[in-house]
Amino acid sequence: MDGQAALRSLQHEYAGMPPVAAMQVRVGDYRDGQLWLSAPLAANVNDKGTAFGGSLTSLMTLAGWGLVALQLRRADIDAEIYVADSQIRYLAPLRDDLHASAGLEDGQSWDEFLRTLAQRGRARVQVRAQVTLPGGDVATTMTGRFVALAKG
Amino acid sequence: MDGQAALRSLQHEYAGMPPVAAMQVRVGDYRDGQLWLSAPLAANVNDKGTAFGGSLTSLMTLAGWGLVALQLRRADIDAEIYVADSQIRYLAPLRDDLHASAGLEDGQSWDEFLRTLAQRGRARVQVRAQVTLPGGDVATTMTGRFVALAKG
C-alpha cells in the first residue's frame, strides 16, 4: 500500500471507532518518521476550558498505534496492534486544538521490528509521542510500547 | 457537602465535559475508599471489538480525578485538580462494559494531603486505579499523581 492510501485507510479506521469519532480525530500527514493527528478542542474540553487529559492521552496513544499501523501497511503485513503500556506526563494546559505527533523512540528500528514480526509472528516497539502547544512547547508527552501479532 | 451530594455533583461535572459525555461515563458509588465509575462498551469500543485503550485510560484518569474531588468536596475545600503524570499497563482485552475503581496508593494519606493543601495552597497525592474484567481479574492498571491548587 502506498503512503497516501495508508493514511486514508488509517483515517477510515479511526472514524470507525465510536470514541475516536466522538473526539473528531483527523489524520494529518506522515513526514520525517512522525505521524501527525489532530482533534478540535471543543470536542475534547474539560471543566477548566483546557484539553481533557483523557483526550490528550487517547490522541497520543492513537498516534503511536497509527504510526505502527502505517509501517505494517506500507510493508503489506497484516497484523493486530495493541498498546502494552505507557507513561504520560502532563506538562502544561492546552487551550487550543490538539495536535499530536508520534515517532520511534531513540534506539528503536522499524527494520528490526518488521524482521522480528516476520520471524516470530510477534514483535514489539517503543514509541514516543507528544502534544504540542501553539507556540511549539510541549503540553504532554507519552512513551509507550506497542505489540504487533501477525494474522493468519 | 455530604457523600451522596458529592457523588451527584461529580456526575454533573463529568456530564459537562463533551469527551466524557461521549463516553457515557456514570458515577457508581464510593465505598471502602474506592470510587467506582462505569461506561458502556458500545461507546468505547475499538476496531477489535474490545475496549479502546484511550477510553480505558480516560476512565481510570477520571476515577482518580473524581476520587480527589470527592475528598475536597466532603471537606468543603474549593480547589482545581490536575493530573500530573500516569503510568498505565494494559494487561488483558475487555469485551464488556468498563468498570473502573480508584483509591489511594499505599503509603498515601488524605489527612496529610488536605493539611498540606490548607498550609501551602498546593498538594499532590498518588492514586492507583484499575479496570476489572467480568470475572474479577484486571484489564488495565494506572498509577498517577494528582495536584490540587486551592482557589481564591
Image: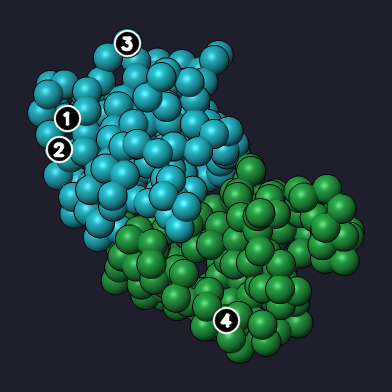
Chain colours: A cyan, B green
Q: Check residue B7 in the rendering and tell me which mark sits there, or answer none.
A: 4
Q: Residue at x 33, y 61 (%)?
A: B18
- Quarter-of-image position of residue A9: top left
In the displayed structure, A71 sits above or below A92; it is above
Residue receiving disc 3: A32
In the displayed structure, B146 sits above or below A70; it is below
Tell me the mark number nearer the camera, choosing from 3 and 4.
4
Whether tag 3 and tag 4 are in contact, CB under 8 A, the answer is no
- Percent x, y of residue A120: 45, 33
Say whether mark 2 and mark 4 are on the same chain: no
Q: Nearer the viewer, residue A113 or A67?
A: A67
Disc 1 marks a residue whose amino acid type is Ala
Q: Nearer the viewer, residue B79 or A70?
A: B79
Residue receiving disc 2: A9
Q: Residue at x 60, y 50 (%)?
A: B82
Residue receiving disc 1: A6
- Percent x, y of residue B26: 45, 78
Structural distance between the alpha carbons of marks 1 and 3: 16 Å
Mark 2 belongs to chain = A
Could you say whether the residue bearing mark 4 is in a helix, strand or loop? helix
Disc 2 marks a residue whose amino acid type is Ser
Number of other residues with Cα within 10 Å of mark 1, as a class: few under 14, some 14 to 19, many 20 or more: some
Disc 3 marks a residue whose amino acid type is Asp
Q: Check residue B106 in the rendering and tell me which mark sits there, or answer none.
A: none
Q: Quadrant of the N terminus of chain B?
A: bottom right
Whether tag 2 and tag 1 are in contact, CB under 8 A, the answer is yes
